[in-house]
Image (cartoon, helix red, strand yellow):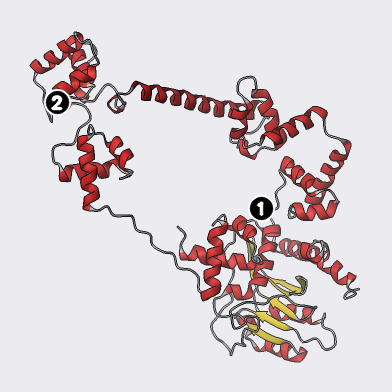
Amino acid sequence: MYSTEQRRVAIETFIGFDHSYADTIAELGYPDRHTLRNWWGEYRETGEVPIAKIIREPRFSDEQKREAVEHYLSHGKRLKRTMRALGYPKSRMTLCGWVDELAPGQRRYRGPNPKRDPVPVEKKVQVVAELEARTGPAVEIAERHGVPRAAPYMWRREIMGDNVGDTEERGVPVSKEFDELPDDVGELQDMLREAKMQLRRVQLELDVRQATLEILKKDPGADPDRLSNAEKAAMVTALRGKYRPCELLPVVSMAKSSYEYAANAQARGETEEHAAARKAVVAAFEASGGTYGYRRITASVGVGEWTVRGIMRDEGLVARAAKRKRGYSSYEGETSEAPPNLLRDERGKHHFRADGPNELWVTDVTEFRIPAGKVYLSPIVDCFDGMPLSWSISTSPDAEMANSSLLGACGWLGEGDHPKVHSDRGCHYRWSGWIRICDEHGLVRSMSRKGCSPDNARCEGFFGRLKAEFFYGCDWSGVTIDEFMGMLDAYLRWYRDVRIKSDLGYRSPMQHRRDLGLAA
């Protein structure tokens, strides 16, 4: 059950990640693909975030209660038996309450209680005498006298003085589970086999954990499911003398074909070609600062996709990612008249794509918090190829920061270029200085609706990738404000000139423009 706020965050993230179900689920950790598709369909039709529906617990009718109580009374007064036969209720306490309500005093209690229901000594002696002279099961004696099955044994220890002091005071059966055992021998044998199988499964899991520590030299908290295929194969081979592969492979989440391939690879050793590929993949991942996934590494090193994925899995290389956090807001009220949203059509669909450079720009301000203080970034991003044309970094989110980034982007304008500049309703884009720069350079202003971040999803997506690759997951202790601003500026230059994008044919935005003759 997800709250309305969780649904809103999921839809915003989905829009910001260019409608990618996989990226959204990986970013947030929820929901599943089917649920997200339903939320998005409802949002697209109504324009509103789906409201969480309250699911109430089912109520049982009086007829169902009477049926459960009658079954309980006529089938040996077993709570579990009634719940298993009828499929309801799920709680033992619920059924006990129904019995006490509809059949007061008829509910069976567990074990004799001297304080509540004292049994005469004569009766105890009679029951024990029959127990000693019995030729059949003890349960027949207990049922004939209307006492629990454990009572004759307790009274025998009491009368014969065989370690009864504690038991009499407690007034509990020898075994709390004894009274719940079935009478059928075949069912008891099935329970015994199931108990042995469960014991073997528990022992298997313990042996796998021990092998993770001793054979693979992993930390005590290492998860066997997160091991590489080579490590899993080595562990399965070491334990084959005690367990069958069909028992071991499901525990380590490994297919039989994968085990055979990994075991054969270990037997013949790694080839020189694969060793070179491994070295190239690791080098490409480290050169990207841990931001490249298998697709961009495949395009960078020229090695097959599945080879790259296998190497990254074996080496534990995972592209940096982090959950979305609440960002900085620059909204200060309606300080001036807001222009319309030129990117949203009549059906409520947004259009963030451009057929050429300098047709559509997006901008916003985001905040970075480090131990040394706060830093703000104001970029201008061209929707043609996602290239940051200009940016300003400052410790104060003032008009000068926003204006300087806009003036820097205007340096990319050619003759006859009049791009749309889309922003949120922040105060930076309502002041006279920003409006004057737009008028002087022929820029067309466009603004999002109030408090609607999906209206500026293209810039929000840019910030999401930037923070996941550069900011989140890093320890910024000891880094000064000036050092952080220099590192952020270096990352943005790397993003513009070096970082490859799949939608640009695995080229950087700058290289893409050079190939088109749009940049020197």
User: Which comes before the other along the chain, label 1 or label 2?
Assistant: 2
Task: Give me the C-alpha separation between circle 1 and circle 2.
Answer: 66 Å
User: Considering the image in quadrants, where does the N terminus appear?
Assistant: bottom left
Q: Secondary structure at mark 2?
A: loop
Residue that badge 2 annotates: 114
Say which amino acid is labelled 1. Answer: Asp
Query: How many residues crowd around disc 1 within 10 Å: few (fewer than 14), some, or many (20 or more)?
Result: few
| Nearest the eye: 36 or 420 | 36
Q: How many marks?
A: 2
Going by the numbered disc 2, the residue's amino acid type is Pro
Which residue in the protein does label 1 denote? 475
Q: In this rendered view, identify the residue nearer to me: 75 or 227.
A: 75
Q: Is residue 289 visible?
A: no
Give the class, few, some or many, for how many residues have Cα within 10 Å of label 2's Cα (few <14, many ≥20): few
The residue located at (91%, 73%) in the rendering is: 520
Residue 418: percent from the left, percent from the top?
77, 87
Q: Is residue 139 left or right of residue 57?
A: left
